[in-house]
Image (cartoon, rainbow, N blue to C red):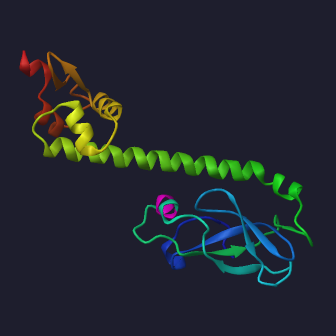
Amino acid sequence: MKENFNECTEEDSRILKVQVVAVDMKHVVIICPVCGQFHWHGTGGFGINKLNYGTRVPHCTTKDIAKKCDKSEPYKEYELITSKETIRREKTLPKDLTAWRSRQRSVRRDMEEQWRLKEEADRDERILKTVRDISRMERWLISDAAMVAPIHVTRWMNRHGIYYEDGQYRVVFASKASPELCEIFGKYEDKK
């Protein structure tokens, strides 16, 4: 049995292995590998002593699933695997989940950070594509065409050494800008 639960691997035929947090006579509780929340699934009448509770379909939306692994084909199911840490009782108690709360919050926090970074990378990619495609370098035009807020365009430009100088955007810090951006925007010293 694998020890690295909740990982995306191609070798598993797109089925995630998910650690069971608690199991009782009716329910199997997991920390969802897609959204980071506790999810309750039925045991299928198998009791509390099984090692594997089979596969289940995620409760999460397709959008959340796509965010998780950045794959074109989202996960359709995951496999519920118990471990020595799995709490087994006739009836799961609230304190059983409290014992796992810090891990659940940590998983969720990590996922939110991954989502934030992915959204930022997607936004930056749209801005760069727009900058390559349009001829007038005005912040509001770039913002509209890339479908991002103007502040994100400003931050993207500043991260790439591009600032508003003398009535237009120019590369002020060439060390931060790629040669392509220097050509598109022109260097500040070249315009003097």
* Relative to 129, residue 163 above or below: above
Q: Could you tell me which residue is drawn at 35 percent across and 30 percent down?
A: 151
Q: Nearer the viewer, residue 93 or 128?
A: 93
Q: Is residue 67 magenta?
A: yes
Residue 22 point in image, percent of width and height: 81, 66
Residue 47 point in image, percent of width and height: 86, 81
Residue 130 point in image, percent of width and height: 20, 44
* Relative to 5, residue 160 above or below: above
Instruction: Kindly give the residue lying farthest to the right in the view shown.
Output: 90
Q: Could you tell me which residue is drawn at 53 percent across and 67 percent down?
A: 8
Residue 156 point in image, percent of width and height: 31, 34
Determine whether, in the image, residue 155 is placed left or right of residue 145.
right
Instruction: Name the quadrant of the N terminus.
Output: bottom right
Residue range of the region highlighted in magenta in the rendering: 65-69
Instruction: Name the quadrant of the C terminus.
Output: top left
Determine whether, in the image, residue 112 is placed left or right of residue 120.
right
Q: Nearer the viewer, residue 39 or 174?
A: 39
* Relative to 117, residue 65 above or below: below
Q: Could you tell me which residue is drawn at 53 percent across and 75 percent down?
A: 76
Instruction: Kindly give the residue lying farthest to the bottom in the view shown.
Output: 45
By secondary structure, the bulk of the magenta-drawn segment is best described as helix
Q: Quadrant of residue 135?
A: top left
Q: Is residue 5 magenta?
A: no
